[in-house]
Structures are given as C-alpha cells and as structure tokens.
Image: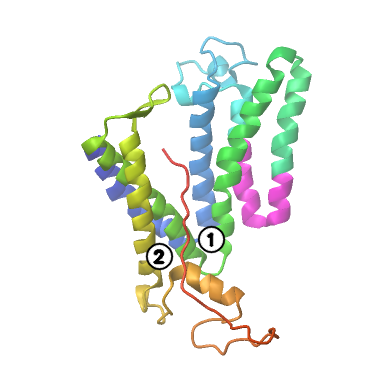
Amino acid sequence: MLPQRVATAVIGVPAILAVIWAGGAWFSVVLGILLFIAALEFYAAVAPAPTNATFLENPLAAISPVPLPRLLNQRPLGLMGAAFTALLVAAAHHGGDWWAGALALAAVLPFLWLVLRGDRERALPDWLHSVGGVLYIGWLGSHLVFLRHLDNGQDWVYLAVFATFANDTSAYFVGGAIGRTKLVPRISPGKTVEGALGAILFGALGLVLLNYALGRPGARGRPARRPGGVAGQARRRRQGCGRVGARPRRRPRPPGQRAVCGAGGILLRLVCD
C-alpha cells in the first residue's frame, strides 16, 4: 500500500502542480475528468447495477461484448449523474449563470427519466442517489473552478488541495501506527478513530504551514508580500488595503474606527478518500 501511494505521489503531485499553475481551460478539463471518475465510483458504491440486467438497468453492460469492470457497471441515473458532474465543472468555467443552469438540469432531468420509467417504488430513492452524487461531488468540486478564478486563485487551490493531502496522509500514518479503535467498520474497515484525530491535528498543522509558505515574502519569485498568507491578502483587499505597495483606498469610517488588516488563514478541509 505504501509503495503504491509513494509512486502515485511521485507521478501525480508534479502533474497536479502543473495543472493548477496553468489554470484556465486546462484546469477545468482535468478537474472535470477527475470528478467524472469520482462520480462513477460514488454511484458504483451506493447504487450498483446488476451485471446481467437489461439495457434500461445497465446500458453499458448490455451493449458490451465483454464483462465490464465494476466502475462501468452503472445504472442510467449513475451515468447521468457522472455526466452532470462534469457538466457543472464546464459550466463553472463559463460563469455562475451557466453553472446555476447546469445545476437545475441535474435536478430536473433525472426526475423526468424516473417519471417516464414509471417505477413508483424506486423513483424517490433513485432520484436522491442521483442528485446526491451530483451535489456531493459535482457541486462541491466545481467550486475549485471558482476558487481558481479568484485573485490569488492559484494559491487558494494549492492550499485547498495540499491541505487535503496532508490530512489524508496524516490519517494513514497515524492510523497505521497507533490505530486500534475502528471508526466505521461497516463502511471502511481500515479507518480508525486515532487516524481521524491524527488527520485533524496534523492536517490543521499542515494547513498553517502551507498558508505561511504560500504567503512567504518572495515565494516563487513574486514580489514580497505582507505576512498572513493568501487568506490575509484576500482579507486586506476586502478591507481596502489593496495590493502590496499600493496606497490603501480611503473609505468613510465612524469616529474612532480603525482599519485593521490583520494576518489570517483558512481552515479548509475537503472530503477525500
């Protein structure tokens, strides 16, 4: 398990760094592909399709001449949900209006499919599975596109992604070293309470260190920044302090009020693994 994780990190981390740095359409396309696969994994876990079903129950298996892997044995609503997950990422790339429209389609079209199918007993659970996967993976994951479009968006995405990696890695090593109490054995037998606590502790510590590294003066060849990391800079802009070296914007303030541009950070943890 550990050699596989190390090999994945050696190959994947430079690729992730490059995609986040590039931004734009490259970032959205790669994110859409990854979330599409994640959605297929979600639907394969919560609503697996029978392998010997008809076209209406498992369309890919019905037309495939060879047995399909578990990931591709999907009900129509699973394929639909994965497609809408990728659509949300593409829509977010084009703006909030497109994103809101894609979200509405993701809720309405699966419902129409269930109405046409006419199965009253499974209609509501199937619709909840479909929309739940789109919200859990597509709606949340597509916010990375909005995050990348912000000022200092590159740093924000680095912070979110690598804080998640720090959390997951901490859970793995702490759980493997001292884990004794099972957390949710029916869902994930390998997870332990000790690993979860280690993830919270060391994940938060990693978040603080990452925020400091991304806000360090002169980092990655950029002009020197004031302390406080990306969160501190965003807060200073909202409070009228502007960019480093620029004259602060003057705003009317009540008597005695001070303009506070303090350092800060975020406590952001995405659900993974």
Residue that label 2 marks: 211
Question: In this picture, is 51 found above or below 115?
Answer: above
x, y percent for residue 207 = 39, 58
Q: Which numbered disc flags the more N-terminal residue, 1 or 2?
A: 1
Question: In this picture, is 220 found above or below 172?
Answer: below
- Residue under the image location 49 percent in, 67 percent down: 231
Label 1 amino acid?
Arg
Q: Is residue 97 magenta?
A: yes
x, y percent for residue 224 = 40, 82
Give residue 69's mark: none
Give the crowd class for mark 2: few <14, some 14-19, many >=20 residues within 10 Å.
Answer: many
Viewer can see residue 24: no
Q: Quadrant of the C terminus?
A: top left
> For the magenta stretch, what is the residue range?
83-102
Question: In this picture, is 77 found above or below 249?
Answer: above
Residue that label 1 marks: 148
Observer-nearest of 230 and 221 = 230
- Residue under the image location 61 percent in, 37 percent down: 134
Observer-nearest of 78 and 193 = 193
Position of 208 compared to 128: left or right?
left
Observer-nearest of 64 and 95 = 95
Q: Nearer the viewer, mark 1 or mark 2?
A: 2
x, y percent for residue 186 = 41, 21
- Residue pushed farthest top? 52
